Amino acid sequence: QVQLVESGGGLVQAGGSLRLSCAASGSFFRINPMSWYRQAPGKQRELVASITSTGSTNYADFVKGRFTISRDNAKNTVYLQMNSLKPEDTADYYCLAHIWVTVRLHDDYWGQGTQVTVSS
């Protein structure tokens, strides 16, 4: 069974930093891409950043220059380094990974979410 486990959320003051991690476990042979989404109260879930297995990245405009996504393929883990945090970054952050269990069986998997709260 494939699982994504996130960690690293918490409470931080505006201007501070947090690092989120998301580790995939289970039986599979490929993960591509890996992404971070977020959902603030009363708002739709939105893409924050994504990264392919070769390291190509994509960022939402509202985090460019502040957040950095990276991954360790050997550990099946994706990271989100968040700097210069703003109160509007407050949300539940979710990891999404497209995982190939077999050559023909692949699907999107979501993590359970980790809460990030930025105080002003």
Image: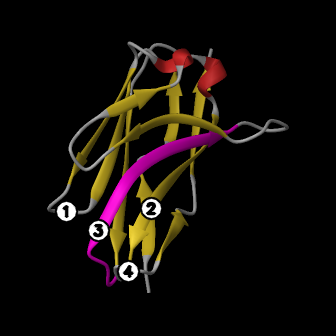
Name the quadrant containing residue 39.
top right
What residue is drawn where x is 41% and y is 68%?
99
Rounded to the nearest angstrom, the CA distance separating label 4 from label 2 is 10 Å
Rounded to the nearest angstrom, the CA distance separating label 3 from label 4 is 7 Å
Q: Crowdedness of circle 1 by 10 Å Cα count: few (<14), some, many (20+)?
A: few
Is 46 located above or below residue 114 in the figure?
A: above
Q: Crowdedness of circle 4 by 10 Å Cα count: few (<14), some, many (20+)?
A: some
Q: Where is residue 79 in the image (x, y as percent from the top left)?
A: 32, 44
Q: Which colour scheme is used?
A: secondary structure
| Residue with the mark numbered 4 | 101
Residue 88 is a magenta residue:
no
Q: Which is more N-terminal, label 2 or label 3?
A: 3
What residue is drawn where x is 51% and y is 70%?
107
Q: Is residue 64 visible?
A: yes
Closer to us: 60 or 80: 60
Rounded to the nearest angstrom, the CA distance separating label 1 from label 2 is 16 Å
Q: Which is more N-terminal, label 1 or label 4?
A: 1
Of all residues, the one furthest to the right in this rendering is: 42
Magenta span dominant secondary structure: strand
For badge 2, the amino acid type reads: His
61 sits to left or right of 50? right
Is the residue under label 4 in contact with that under label 3 (CB below 8 Å)? no
Q: In which quarter of the image is the N terminus?
A: bottom left
Tell us which disc is closer to us: 4 or 1.
Answer: 4
Local SS, label 1: loop
Q: Residue 30 carries which label?
A: 3
Which range is magenta?
26-39
For badge 4, the amino acid type reads: Val
Q: Residue 98 carries which label?
A: 2
Q: Where is residue 7 in the image (x, y as percent from the top left)?
A: 42, 54
| Residue with the mark numbered 1 | 75
Tell us which disc is closer to us: 1 or 3.
Answer: 3
